Amino acid sequence: MRISEVMTRDVQTVTPEQTAREAASFMLSADAGSIPVTEGERLIGMITDRDIAVRGVAQGHGPDTPVRDLMSSGVVSARIDDDVEDVAARMSEAQVRRLPVIDESEKLVGIVSLGDLSRETDDQTAEQVLENVSAPGGQHQQ
């Protein structure tokens, strides 16, 4: 099964110029801990609630700090034609609950979450990802 069959296509994004407050507001309304950062349609990073709290608040940045100053770059992502099992392994290894999906020109075309995997794959795949995502350690960057 391809990731394009299980991913969510309607993805909320922020730009690097938007503020941490706006990113946090989008996360709150979407009940998500991360949101992709795009320039045009091209994925350039992710910002997480942890980025806002740790890179932002803990280092004295206010709510009007641009997303660019807090986001994680070097994003782990999936390609639209990747196999679901491969993407699940990538999520598990990177210890992330959501992974952006891009096309061949790095245009953001969707996002896949642990919830998507649990609904659309066998229980063992989602269980393995959850177990590794929840394990202590790792980078937890997105």
Image (spheres, rainbow, N blue to C red):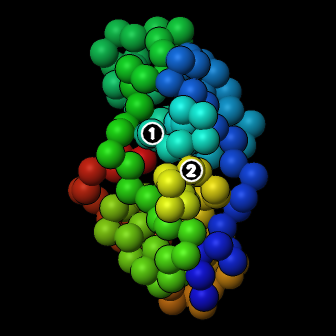
Name the residue rendered at 48%, 16% in the picture.
66
Q: Amino acid at mark 1?
A: Ile
Q: Residue at x 61, y 41 (%)?
A: 41
> How far is disc 1 from disc 2 in space, using C-alphas?
10 Å
Q: Which circle marks residue 44 in the picture?
A: 1
Give the class, few, some or many, for how many residues have Cα within 10 Å of label 1's Cα (few <14, many ≥20): many
**In front of the other: 113 or 40:** 40
Among numbered discs 1 and 2, the one appearing first in the sequence: 1
Q: Is residue 41 visible?
A: yes
The quarter of the displayed image where residue 76 is located: bottom left
The residue wearing badge 2 is 107
Q: Amino acid at mark 2?
A: Lys
* Circle number at residue 133: none
Tell me: residue 105, above or below residue 47. below
Q: Choose mark 1 or mark 2, whichever is in front.
A: 2
Location of the N terminus (image quadrant): bottom right
Residue name at image x 50 percent, y 44 percent: 43
Q: Which residue is drawn at the image coordinates 44% and 59% (left, top)?
A: 77
Q: In the rendering, at what x and y percent does residue 114 appear? A: 57, 67
